[in-house]
Amino acid sequence: MTKSKGNFLRKFMGFIEYVGNKLPHPVTIFIILSVIVIIVSEIAYRLGVYVEYLGFKDGVQTMITAHAVSLLNAEGIRVMLVKSVTNFTSFAPLGTVLVGMLGIGVADNTGFIGTALKALVLRTPRRLVTAVVVFAGIMSNVASDAGYVILIPLGAIVFLSMGRHPLAGLAAAFAGVSGGFSANLLIGTLDPLLSGISTTAAQIIDPSYIVVPTSNYYFLLASVPFLTVIGSFITEKIVEPQLGEYKGPHVIETMEVTDLEKKGLKWAFISVLIFSIIMAIMVIPSNGVLRGPNGEFLTSPFITSIVTIMMMFFLIPGVFYGIATGSVKNDKHIITFMAKSMSSMGLYLVLAFFASQFIFYFSYTKLGTIVSVGGANFLKSTGFTGITLIISFILVTAFINLFMGSASAKWAIMAPIFIPMLMQVGYSPEFVQLAYRIGDSSTNIISPLMSYFAMILAFASKYDVEGKEASGLGTIISMMIPYSICFLVFWSILLVIWFTLGLPIGIGGTIYL
């Protein structure tokens, strides 16, 4: 990278860091937005603002008139106070995320997830190691943020052990963990979290609408090999050649899987196999216990209980791994691990409380409907629809992500506006959510405001070479920009192909309403 390009990059990322640091905390943003909604609702009510749109009432499509409702009159004040608790407890993502974390917390704290990731990477043939590091990074997001702590430093160590530049291994792992955060072969914690927010937003237009966690599954499943190939190519053809030969000390840290850990993995995978067989018996036959009426699958108990099933999918092997390795000696340890995972969700609970109030206010005042219908009518009048509209939405999301890292916080703000708006022009909430996930994931790796960025810098600094400039923000950003651009471009192209072919995007998810 030339000096002029490096200076421009540092100035640009410095600007992003400056602006992002000036933004209030996401919780404060929701409080500010709630106050704005309260004030605007009174103004809109006094001006007699209303819209007419084709919506659903009692399951029947009909013309609906929505008048602005004030929150500053006696009824509005009563509603805000009375509904504050139920807004929080009925917030769709709340229960799904907490239930999922019960199982993942046990699997993580017993050491099962970390050991499984180590085993996957360390047992890989040399020629496939780059692809497996990227792939393992993508897969690690099923366990929320475990990949940041475990896999990224492991990627550097694996590359170093093979005589390759450790920062290339770090970059490959970081690209998979963070850039491919939404893609996976399994349903992870992000799926129920985002689908819950999407459900709340979609119900502004259709009160009966439900977005299921599996609604983006087909597309995200196909994205895994797609992103793995792209990430591997960028690592081997762009990033690693640019880094050159590593001149630092080749001190290899011990990251072997011990005999005790191997024993734990054996029992964990046996338990997963047995659990999978039991689930298959209940799901595959048309008269299975978890199939719906007349053998239906999309509306079956299996789909509606997917969060609980995924919780068990992690809990069971986590317990067996813990028993085999000694990290679980009695039931108290399991409960402690569950409690530990719940304690880590404290900030999320605070965020969920204020996000739920904002979304309720936005819906109750009809401002969400008014904004979405007005926006949809504007889009129709300009002719700015189709895939061009969706790509523009992806780019807007990618840009906003540079300044606000939390996927759930951004979506809680954006979903009540964009989902109803795009529903009005015929797109499903599931498709809008999918477009959001592409934009949100692609720029994670170049946002200095991403919560783990400081930790990545710390990992990189371990491989600083004496006499050369220490690893800093510019080092990481310059390494990760090729991944970010290529992920954003080629992932969007994959979506265009999917859109053109009209393929289903997931179980219970389509492109159009």
Image (cartoon, grey):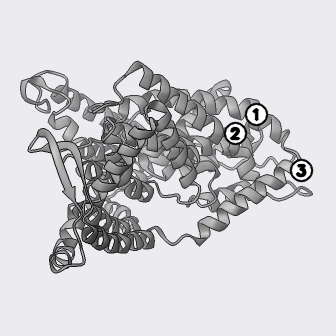
Number of disc labels: 3
User: Circle 2 sits on which residue?
Assistant: 482
Label 1, label 2: how far apart the Cα atoms are: 8 Å
User: Circle 1 sits on which residue?
Assistant: 238
Relative to 478, is 189 on the left or the right? Answer: left
Measuring from the top left, give residue 197's x and y in whole percent.
32, 52
Residue that appears at 71% across and 57% down:
13
Q: Which of marks 3 and 1 is nearer the N terminus?
A: 3
Q: In which quarter of the image is residue 290?
A: top left
Question: Which quadrant does the N terminus fall into?
Answer: top right
Relative to 274, is 173 on the left or the right? Answer: right
Secondary structure beneath label 3: helix
The numbered mark at residue 11 is none
Secondary structure beneath label 2: helix
Measuring from the top left, give residue 279's x and y in whole percent.
22, 32
Mark 3, other Cα within 10 Å: few <14 / some 14–19 / many ≥20: few
**Looking at the picture, does residue 502 appear above or below residue 227?**
above
Secondary structure beneath label 1: helix
Q: Do the residues labelled 3 and 1 touch (CB within 8 Å)?
A: no
Q: Do the residues labelled 1 and 2 touch (CB within 8 Å)?
A: yes
User: Circle 3 sits on which residue?
Assistant: 3
Residue that appears at 76% across and 34% down:
238
Can residue 231 be spotted in the picture? Answer: yes
Q: Earlier in the sequence, mark 1 or mark 2?
A: 1
Front residue (pair 479, 134):
479
Front residue (pair 454, 143):
454
Outermost residue toward the front in this view: 47
